[in-house]
Amino acid sequence: MTLKFKITYLEAIRRRYFAGSKKRKTEILNELCEVTGYSRKHAIRVLSVGHMTSKKNSGRTRVYSKESIIHLKRIWHIMGRICSKKMAAAMPVWLKFYQGPEFTPLVKEELLNMSSSTIDRYLRDYKKQFSRRKRTGTRRSKHFQNVIPLKNFDHFATRPGYIQADTVAHCGNSLSGVFIWTMTVTDEFTGWTENRAMYGKGALAAHDAVCVALYDVPFRAISFNTDNGTEFLNETLHKLICRDRNIKFTRSRSYRKNDNAHVEQKNFTHVREIFGYERLDFEELVEEMDKIYRFHFNVLHNYFIPQQKLISKTRVGSKYVKVYDAPKTPYQRVMESPDISRRRKEELRKDYEKLNPIELKRELNEKMKEFHRYHEKLKAKKKALMEYYDRYGSDNNAKKAS
């Protein structure tokens, strides 16, 4: 059989092969192998030439468009870079207020249909560029360790009011000198969190910060647990907690951060995420930080950012299997609690109905820009003042300058 005849023969049967049924294709292949002497696999490859114009992608068909992935990343930043399970739970509320270029009803529907595992898959590589750092400025108070009892670690909070507190240092790379600290107060049961800024780590500064934070928590505190730092274990705060407010004051074990885990985990999500690791040592910034915490950041997180609670933790071999409840915002947990009065719930509901999470986030971003501009202005003023004293500080330099 000549080559020219083979080419003519293949062109004649190729169209019949792909237009035929499975049975017909089998008959054509058998005939081709018998006439030409080709093996069966080679005959299939020869017949396929010119039929497939493009390579077929393997795997499942893409469900979500590129636009939905772009908006997913934007919403992740707006929500404060929370985990996928919390994000999926909060998405229906946030998308009511979200607006953006090319944000069509189809894109909105795709985002609402995304599961937490799908969100994780699309954000996995994007999240890698955001890292965390760790440092501590806790100094133990040895005297009051004998006065304030250890926390009962067999007890689990079953109602709102079990408060944990901790401080975060805005010290940059050095703990020397006086700088701003953030006091974080959180409730174990609901996750409701309040932050306050204070200048220095003295007892009076911690006293004022705790007073304001406890006042803004929408329920009465039953227990107050802290680490062994000197800002907490002192006579001033002991008098406020135990005598004035009749709250049970307990402490954690030294070097055991998990004893105060509910507030320790907020050191990054509620402090570092917003103010970072830069050194803040100007007293003028305390008031600005308090405004950001009180009227923007805490409101956003308490009303619109879901949290998950650990239900059980079981050891299986060398691993721990953890089970969490459904993501809910602190506001939702407060409203579901039977221990909160109807009057207080109605007040919170009225506040909630006035809020818009997208607008809150936009205002927060604007306040943070103003805060950083003010900080840069203070640093420039301090630098100019230091240069002036370096140049004209001594009497000789002052005479020369005159």
Image: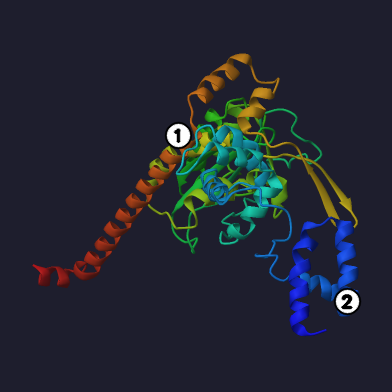
Q: Are marks 2 and 1 in contact (CB under 8 Å)?
A: no
Looking at this view, name the residue that lies furthest to the bottom: 2
User: Which is closer to the viewer, label 2 or label 1?
Assistant: 2
SS state under label 2: helix
Residue at x-position 65% and y-position 65% = 53
- In the image, 89 versus 322, the foreground residue is 89
Identify which residue is drawn at 14% across, 68% down: 398
Marker disc for residue 35:
2
Residue at left 75%, top 29%? 158
State the CA–CA distance, disc 2 to disc 1. Answer: 85 Å
Indicate the position of residue 373 as horizontal and vertical percent values: 33, 51
Say which quarter of the image contains residue 323. top right
- The amino acid pointed to by label 2 is Val
**Category of crowding for the residue at label 1, using alpha-carbon neighbours closer than 10 angstroms: few (below 14), some (14–19), many (at least 20):** few
Q: Quadrant of residue 311?
A: top right
Residue 100 place in picture, x, y as percent: 46, 42
In the picture, the disc for residue 153 is none
In this picture, residue 162 sits left or right of residue 231: right
Q: Secondary structure at mark 1?
A: helix
Q: Is residue 253 visible?
A: no
Question: Percent position (x, y) of residue 12?
Answer: 76, 68
Judging depth in this view, the residue of 384 and 319 nearest the camera is 319
Residue drawn at x 59%, y 57% as measured from the top left: 127
Which residue is most to the left?
402
User: Is the residue 312 above or below the residue 26 in the image?
Assistant: above
| Quadrant for the N terminus in the image | bottom right
- Tell me the crowding category of disc 2: few under 14, some 14 to 19, or many 20 or more residues within 10 angstroms, Cα based: few
Mark earlier in primary sequence (2, 1): 2
Q: Is residue 11 visible?
A: yes
The quadrant where residue 243 appears: top right
Q: Point out the image quarter for the C terminus.
A: bottom left
Which residue bears the numbered disc 1?
Answer: 295
